[in-house]
Amino acid sequence: MKKKLMSLFAAAMLLSACGNGTSVQNNGSTDGSASGNEGSDTVKIGVNLELSGEVSAYGNAELQGIKLAVEEINAAGGILDKQIELVEKDNKSSNDEAASVAANLADKEKVVAVVGPATSGATKASLANLTKMGVPVITPSGTDDAITLNGNQVQEYAFRSCFQDSFQGVILAKYADENLKASKAIILGDSASDYAKGLTKAFKGSYQGEIVAEENFVAGDKDFQAVLTNIKGKDFDVLYIPGYYTEAGLIIKQAREMGIEQPIIGADGFGDEKLVEIAGEKNVSNIFYTAHFSTSAPANDKVEPFIAAFTEKYDSAPAQFSALAYDAIYMIKQAIEDQEAATPAAITKGLTELKDFVGVTGTMTMDEQHNPEKSAVVLGMTEGKETSAETVNP
């Protein structure tokens, strides 16, 4: 996110290619035996982010975190006495473009690892090319379970610094049950979004109350009056919106203006200052969502120095997406140092074996499915401001 966050997103906030990708020199083969840029004077890391287009707020927030981490690491001597060299690419919030960027970074730029995309669909679209070239990728905020697990098969080169949708769905169901005492819920989600589908499935699998109704919208919709009129006529305690801020902000605005006052809950896609800009401050009350990072519930003593450095550099508080991307760079650094080699194969092995890594979004150990094990925070908002932060474990 860019400037002036409406709150300090502290404890915790979601998609074939051009080029054949047949060359495996330097980056190695599909079995992960890549040599990377081992003979180079730099550690070349690719950035594949949504820097323009529909969800550019996520990508730009993550780029800020990435740049801060790289500056810190390089100023401290780099990794194995080598400076990090970033290769930044804009996937334009397009799945097809994300796949093309991935091919370019792996095959042409010879990067040893990639950070991004930010969204689940773009991340999944990029995996075929990165897997073909044996280059590991960390998505800071792609939460779809299928990113790291395709059926029963673990995606060898896919990792994340965020928790996954099934985890968020469980957390939100537990919060609705135990904290909000909500016995009846309505779900309003994007029918075409992998992000929304995963969140919905996990919530329904864990929620102890009654699902009164399930309604749908499509990304890009602006007018929700009809579906909200239908919802208003029902008996329910909580409205669950598994979606991004773009539509969620409009739904919140129109729902509150229609007199729908029940709590509204959502996942990390709510976590951008634009949610409040779209919905209007007065309407963003009784809103709760899962987040990865919060100054109100700092994970450890690394958080305050990170906030101070970020604020000094960008003159704004860090968004959770910035924190997740910042951690992703340091995770790559840790993997390289653990394996004493800056190659794709070494980084892949190091990330797979990552244990007790202390990041600003929490202490992480990579599980067998390449998901970091850590707690989540549910943030509460009143009149557009963060007013609560509760750590929740599944």
Image: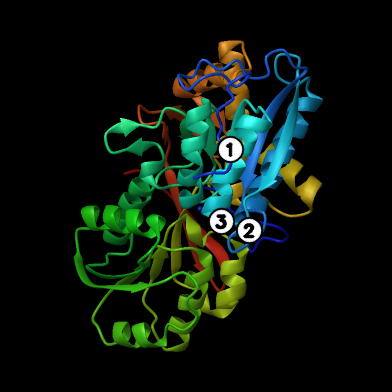
Q: Position of residue 321 (x, y in %)?
A: 59, 49
Q: Residue at x 61, y 15 (%)?
A: 337
In the image, which disc is placed on residue 246?
A: none
Number of residues whose C-alpha sits closer than 10 Å to that of mark 1, classed few (under 14), some (14–19) or many (20 or more): many
Quadrant position of the N terminus in the picture: bottom right
Please tell me whether mark 3 sits on a helix, a strand or a loop: loop
In the image, which disc is placed on residue 103?
A: 1
Determine the image quadrant of residue 150.
top left
User: Along the horizontal axis of the image, is 121 left or right of 301?
Assistant: left
The type of residue carrying mark 3 is Ser
User: Along the horizontal axis of the image, is 274 left or right of 217?
Assistant: right
Q: Which residue is mark 2?
A: 56
Q: Residue at x 28, y 38 (%)?
A: 151
Residue lying at the far top in this picture: please name it. Answer: 340
Q: Position of residue 285 (x, y in %)?
A: 49, 73
In the image, which disc is placed on residue 94?
A: 3
User: Is residue 179 among what the camera can see?
Assistant: yes
Front disc: 2 or 1: 1
